[in-house]
Amino acid sequence: MNSRLRGVFAPVLTPFKEGLEPDVERFIAHCRWLISQQVNLAIFGTNSESASLSVDERIAMTDAILQADIPAERLMPGTGGCSITDAIRLTRHAVDSGASGVLMLPPFYFKGVSDEGLFAYYAEVIERVASDRLKIYLYHIPQLTQVPITLNLIAMLRTRYPDTVVGAKDSSGNWDNTRAMLEHFAKDGFDVFPASESLLSRALPLGATGCISATVNVNPAGIQAVYEGWNGPQGRVLQAKADVIRNIFQATAMIPAMKRVVAEFSKQPSWRVVRPPLCALSDAAAGDLLRMLAEAGFDMPGYPKI
């Protein structure tokens, strides 16, 4: 892991077959389409349903996309979890595979844990993986984990491991928190990725590195255009167009909604499948979603019919 990650990342959707096993062929096809749209891949993030995937499944799917010539340097695999041994195994596999960084949730089962306890968790992973190629991006999503990545924790980790703990994804939805991360750490080479493209025009001038956003799965070109042109003459127009699509998706259950839309554009109904406890989008909700997207001029050009 030598090159630092920049730009727009999709927390890649995981397709399942009707029997709920991962559909590796469609996973590869989706990754290839995203790469063709000039974005990068944060495989096994929240929108990948990663908490519903086993360690063995994640490793096998990573191996499959690498064997399909998806560039390892475009990957930011999610490797955090409650079990420190699982996190070490996933992180070591990512390093050995040549990924440019890993996105690490905190251990999220126990609540009310201290920054010292979280520091010990991350330190244990770093020390046991024991590689100068390891680059960790902390994953702050307190509305789901209820275990925040605080500014104090970032400072503690940066003091001990400045060349390893190199960034964060802020999925809090709290602009003040994102801005505080940027103001405290961006000037010292800490890379901050907001979790929504809607924040790009505000975050990039303060030193943000890009974004890791669910809707990159379905609107990669539009979001990449914002990243590249936010400060150009069409910056506001590009941001507004991306915001319209984002707002439509986030008004409903985003993972089932995105999967239903991919199913429509790929002509593959099995893309609708989500693993329990999630439920597929109802036909009524899907009809409303597709109508609003059509009115907004939404498209997924070149999406593979597989």
Image (spheres, rainbow, N blue to C red):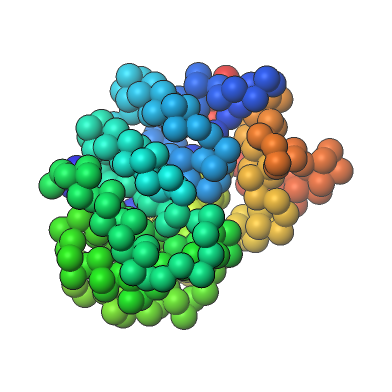
Above or below residue 66? Residue 52 is below
Question: Where residue 174 sits in the image (x, y, percent)?
Answer: 52, 74
| Left or right: 231 as drawn, with respect to 159 | right
| Left or right: 101 as drawn, with respect to 198 | left
Name which quarter of the figure residue 15 lies in: top right
Question: Where residue 187 sits in the image (x, y, percent)?
Answer: 21, 75
Q: Residue furthest left?
A: 132
Question: Where residue 125 sits in the image (x, y, percent)?
Answer: 28, 49
Q: 304 or 147, which is in the foreground? A: 147
Q: 271 or 35, which is in the foreground? A: 271
Q: 262 or 107, which is in the foreground? A: 107
Q: Residue at x 37, y 70 (%)?
A: 115
| Left or right: 101 as drawn, with respect to 9 | left
The C terminus appears in which quarter of the rendering?
top right
Name which quarter of the figure residue 128 lies in: top left
Q: Residue at x 58, y 38 (%)?
A: 52
Q: Residue at x 65, y 25 (%)?
A: 20
| Left or right: 288 as drawn, with respect to 158 | right
Q: Residue at x 26, y 56 (%)?
A: 123
Question: Where residue 106 sits in the image (x, y, percent)?
Answer: 42, 57
Report if residue 150 is visible in the image.
yes
The N terminus appears in which quarter of the rendering?
top left
Report if residue 5 is visible in the image.
no
Q: How many marks?
A: 0
Above or below residue 8? Residue 88 is above
